[in-house]
Image (cartoon, grey):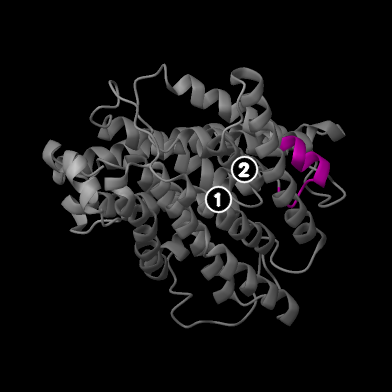
């Protein structure tokens, strides 16, 4: 039976969760060079449109439809076409099925926006759009079925992911690493420092992202419950602890706590707490957020020694952070919130073993399948823009517009960057 309070809570959280994709667009627009600001924002916004249509026609069935092939994938059933209002019979028993599936679409769109953004400043728009469609269908939807559907094989195996640390962030982060390697480094990345052009945009985006993240994590409880309250607290304390930990380690190692570091720490803390949000108490969420931020900080430092250009650190923040969060759930899950989800620190090993298997399988599958999709798209369409278009900037070359109209003095001073 539908509970009006639960349905209203999830609808409100969905409205907040819609902020995630444009908020990440603002963050990324501020981090790239000025000549690529619009393309970076559009790189997050366009996947929302692509995935919404794909989800309506195909994705919701692949992820949450009747099981096919022993927990590997679902069958498209057109559930959203009829806008059915009976409760979902598995994960969400008190809200309409149409609301459940629409909320899940927001997670798919956010994951697609993250993985697509790894090619920022040099990937072709049309190729990225085709890649997003294929990646969502062949990577995200099956993994969502494995982990989030009660008929999925990893769910039955015992793996858990409350709000996407594994399904959203680990898949998107590993996929982003594949994209960064396939597209190649930005021109000049080895010889010049490519600084963010507008950290004010990043600040606004981070604030809106945190708000949207609260909506998403709380909404994933599917109603008014102890899990929803835990998710609310975990999102606040995890993000704050991540910011504090990142700033402290920056100050200790360089003598300066940077603004960009604080924003990155917030996002890392949020990512790290996603898998465990509704399964851990606030102190554990804070520990998980801080630990994730420290590990992500180290991963980004190591990136400089490796031969790939993940210009927006999608792999470092979301991939590494999602994996840390998924494993952290295996350690810290509190049985007081869900008696069926018990962490290693409470003396049970089953959940930790299931999380290890889930992480290994999801990372391997995502890497192999994403690389295959990129190979096909590159052969068919080409992944990268021409050197001339890259030098001009993707805003003008790919979209015919500029994010900023320069004054005469600045226009005369130098090229549009």
**Residue at which label 1 appears:** 206
Residues drawn in magenta: 277-288
Residue drawn at (34%, 62%) of the image: 50
Asked whether residue 42 is in view, the answer is yes
Nearer to me, 160 or 285: 285
Q: In the picture provided, is 352 more to the left or to the right than 110?
A: right
Q: Is residue 381 magenta?
A: no
398, above or below 262, in the image: below
Badge 1 crowding class, 10 Å Cα cut-off, few under 14, some 14 to 19, many 20 or more, is many
Secondary structure at numbered mark 1: helix
Nearer to me, 359 or 189: 189
Q: Position of residue 304 (x, y in %)?
A: 42, 20
Residue drawn at (20%, 47%) of the image: 411
Q: Position of residue 135 (x, y in %)?
A: 36, 49
For residue 389, what is the image quadrant?
top left
Whole-Å distance between the Cαs marked 2 and 1?
8 Å
């Amino acid at each position: 039976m539908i509970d009006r309070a639960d349905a209203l809570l999830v609808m409100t959280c969905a409205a907040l969760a819609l902020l995630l994709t444009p908020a990440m667009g603002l963050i990324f627009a501020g981090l790239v060079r000025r000549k690529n600001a619009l393309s970076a924002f559009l790189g997050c916004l366009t996947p929302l449109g692509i995935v919404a249509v794909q989800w309506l026609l195909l994705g919701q069935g692949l992820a949450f439809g009747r099981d096919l092939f022993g927990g590997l994938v679902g069958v498209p059933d057109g559930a959203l076409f009829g806008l059915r209002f009976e409760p979902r019979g598995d994960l969400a028993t008190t809200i309409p099925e149409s609301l459940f599936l629409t909320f899940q679409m927001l997670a798919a769109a956010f994951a697609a926006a993250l993985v697509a953004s790894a090619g920022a400043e040099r990937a072709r728009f049309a190729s990225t759009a085709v890649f997003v469609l294929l990646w969502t269908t062949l990577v995200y939807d099956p993994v969502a079925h494995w982990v989030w559907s009660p008929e999925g094989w990893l769910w039955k195996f015992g793996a858990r992911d409350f709000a996407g640390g594994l399904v959203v962030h680990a898949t998107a982060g590993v996929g982003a690493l594949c994209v960064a390697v396939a597209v190649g480094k930005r021109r000049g990345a080895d010889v010049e420092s490519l600084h963010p052009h507008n950290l004010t945009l990043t600040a606004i985006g981070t604030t809106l992202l945190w708000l949207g993240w609260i909506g998403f994590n709380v909404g994933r409880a599917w109603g008014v419950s102890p899990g929803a309250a835990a998710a609310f607290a975990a999102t606040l304390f995890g993000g704050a602890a991540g910011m504090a930990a990142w700033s402290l380690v920056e100050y200790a190692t360089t003598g300066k706590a940077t603004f960009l570091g604080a924003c990155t720490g917030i996002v890392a803390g949020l990512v790290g707490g996603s898998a465990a949000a509704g399964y851990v108490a606030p102190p554990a969420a804070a520990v998980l957020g801080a630990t994730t931020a420290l590990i992500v900080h180290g991963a980004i430092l190591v990136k400089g020694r490796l031969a790939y250009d993940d210009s927006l650190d999608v792999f470092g923040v979301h991939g590494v952070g999602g994996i840390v969060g998924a494993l952290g759930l295996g350690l810290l899950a509190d049985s007081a919130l869900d008696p069926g989800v018990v962490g290693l620190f409470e003396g049970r090993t089953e959940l930790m073993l299931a999380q290890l298997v889930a992480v290994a399988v999801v990372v391997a599958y995502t890497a192999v399948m994403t690389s295959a999709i990129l190979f096909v798209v590159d052969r068919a369409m080409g992944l990268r823009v021409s050197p001339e278009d890259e030098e001009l900037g993707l805003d003008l070359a790919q979209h015919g517009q500029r994010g900023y109209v320069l004054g005469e003095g600045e226009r005369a001073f130098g090229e549009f960057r």
